[in-house]
Image (tube, rainbow, N blue to C red):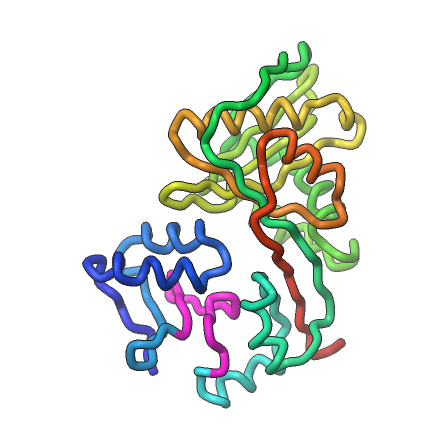
């Protein structure tokens, strides 16, 4: 069994199958847009077992773990790794490895590229900016607060050096916006993946002193309008426990289209 290079001429035949099996449709679109030398699929005959790009195989890229050799599957029992997807996507892994060490449940929400239902005035003091890698120092304090509150389970798990490096890379690869009030960074939003017809957004966060001032609402409206003019839909994940955020997204026209879970396996736990 090898990682087989699939020529671009055959990608249209794989698209529908991948959309049925890949947890995130937008990730499938992103994969299909990679340079041809980066598109590879793990095949067993005509059966797709997984996908990989940049010559890296990640657990979440494996569609059918039971199809891989036993020695390959057993190697994961000594590793820490995370997976995300729908319950059906995760069930083969849970069958192999049992209940995960930790997990977090999310709603997967989407918004078609339709006009916003109502108009609101941007708060007078809010200035909206696009961001890039040069803004790392300015945005890092807010990003750090976001990761400590919304990403890590325990503050002791937070690796500041690695997280800062990853955020710097994201600033150079994805689209980012932030809102400021009197030159103070107050809120932010980013894209996480770009598909053919959809954009996945994430990292929506408001600094503690500026919450309940409708700043994130105004910033998201700006981002929605930006992509609506390009006829692109938006999708995102929101923790099921975060009722306030879910309410915000619903007011902006997002709807729940599925349930997803992130699971963490750790052999030392």
216 versus 167 height, above or below: above
Name the side, left or right, on which 188 lies relative to 33: right
**Where are the magenta residues, as a range?**
49-66
Q: Is residue 227 above or below residue 47?
A: above
Q: In the displayed structure, would residue 32 be above or below residue 134?
A: below
Membership of 61 in magenta stretch: yes
- Image coordinates of residue 189 in percent, x first then y, are 59, 34
In the rendered image, which quarter is residue 46 located in?
Answer: bottom left
Location of residue 244 by image quarter: top right
Q: Residue at x 67, y 14 (%)?
A: 123
Which residue is found at the position 52% from the left and 70% from the top?
59
- Single out the residue that lies furthest toward the left: 9
Q: Quadrant of residue 232?
A: top left
Q: Residue at x 62, y 55 (%)?
A: 259
Residue 63, image x and y in percent? Answer: 46, 71
Q: Above or below — where is 33 with respect to 244?
A: below
Q: Position of residue 40 (x, y in %)?
A: 32, 66
Q: From the viewer's perspective, is 67 left or right of 44?
A: right
Coordinates of residue 115 in the picture (x, y in percent)? 49, 24
Residue drawn 76% across the image and 49% down it? 241
In the image, 225 versus 87, the foreground residue is 87
Taking the magenta stretch, the answer to whether it contains residue 12 is no
């Amino acid at each position: 069994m090898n990682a087989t290079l699939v020529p671009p001429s055959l990608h249209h035949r794989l698209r529908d199958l991948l959309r049925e099996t890949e947890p995130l449709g937008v990730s499938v679109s992103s994969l299909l847009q990679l340079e041809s030398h980066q598109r590879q699929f793990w095949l067993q005959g005509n059966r797709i077992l997984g996908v990989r790009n940049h010559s890296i195989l990640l657990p979440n890229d494996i569609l059918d773990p039971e199809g891989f050799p036993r020695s390959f599957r057993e190697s994961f029992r000594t590793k820490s790794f995370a997976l995300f997807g729908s319950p059906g996507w995760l069930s083969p892994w849970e069958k192999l490895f049992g209940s995960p060490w930790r997990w977090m449940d999310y709603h997967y929400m989407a918004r078609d590229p339709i006009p916003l239902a109502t108009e609101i005035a941007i708060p007078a003091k809010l200035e909206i900016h696009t961001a890039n890698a040069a803004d790392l120092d300015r945005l890092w304090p807010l990003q750090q607060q976001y990761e400590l509150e919304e990403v890590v389970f325990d503050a002791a798990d937070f690796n500041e050096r690695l997280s800062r490096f990853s955020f710097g890379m994201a600033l150079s690869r994805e689209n980012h916006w932030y809102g400021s009030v009197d030159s103070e960074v107050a809120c932010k939003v980013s894209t996480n993946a770009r598909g053919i017809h959809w954009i996945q957004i994430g990292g929506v966060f408001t600094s503690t002193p500026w919450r309940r001032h409708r700043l994130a609402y105004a910033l998201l409206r700006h981002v929605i309008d930006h992509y609506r003019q390009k006829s692109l839909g938006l999708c995102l994940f929101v923790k099921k426990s975060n009722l306030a955020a879910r309410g915000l997204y619903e007011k902006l026209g997002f709807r729940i289209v599925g349930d997803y879970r992130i699971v963490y396996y750790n052999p030392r736990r």
